[in-house]
Image: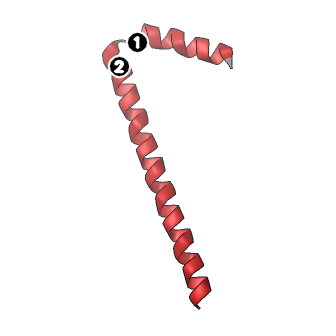
């Protein structure tokens, strides 16, 4: 794990600040989409449980 962190640090230091910001914002967008998908899945499971309970 330390080797991976060191490689990531070296790569990050070689990038321009603009590129780092773009990568960071891209990653945030990916996480936002993943969180939204997880919320949708949770709502669907809750709806299925409710249907089972009341059917």
> In this view, which residue lies farthest toward the left?
18
> In this view, which residue lies farthest toward the bottom?
55
Quadrant location of residue 30? top left
Front one among 22 and 53? 53
Question: Are circles 1 and 2 on residues that touch, CB within 8 Å?
Answer: yes
Looking at the rendered structure, the number of numbered marks drawn on it comes to 2
- Residue 49 higher or lower than 10, as above or below: below
**Residue that numbered label 1 is attached to:** 15
Residue at point 49%, 67% (across, down): 43
Quadrant where the N terminus is found in the figure = top right
**Residue that numbered label 2 is attached to:** 19
**Whole-percent x and y of residue 37?**
47, 56
**Whole-percent x and y of residue 38?**
51, 55
**Is 53 left or right of 44, judged from the image as shown?**
right
**Whole-percent x and y of residue 28?**
40, 36
- Residue 42 higher or lower than 11, as above or below: below
Q: Residues within 10 Å of mark 1 (few under 14, many from 20)?
A: few
Quadrant location of residue 55? bottom right
Looking at the rendered structure, the secondary structure element under dot 1 is: loop
Q: Residues within 10 Å of mark 2 (few under 14, many from 20)?
A: few
Residue at point 60%, 11% (across, down): 6
Residue at point 53%, 12% (across, down): 9
């Amino acid at each position: 794990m330390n080797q991976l962190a060191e490689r990531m640090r070296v790569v990050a230091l070689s990038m321009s600040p603009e590129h780092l910001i773009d990568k960071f914002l891209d990653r945030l967008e990916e996480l936002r989409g993943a969180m939204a998908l997880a919320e949708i899945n949770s709502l669907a499971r809750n709806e299925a449980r409710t249907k089972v309970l009341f059917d």
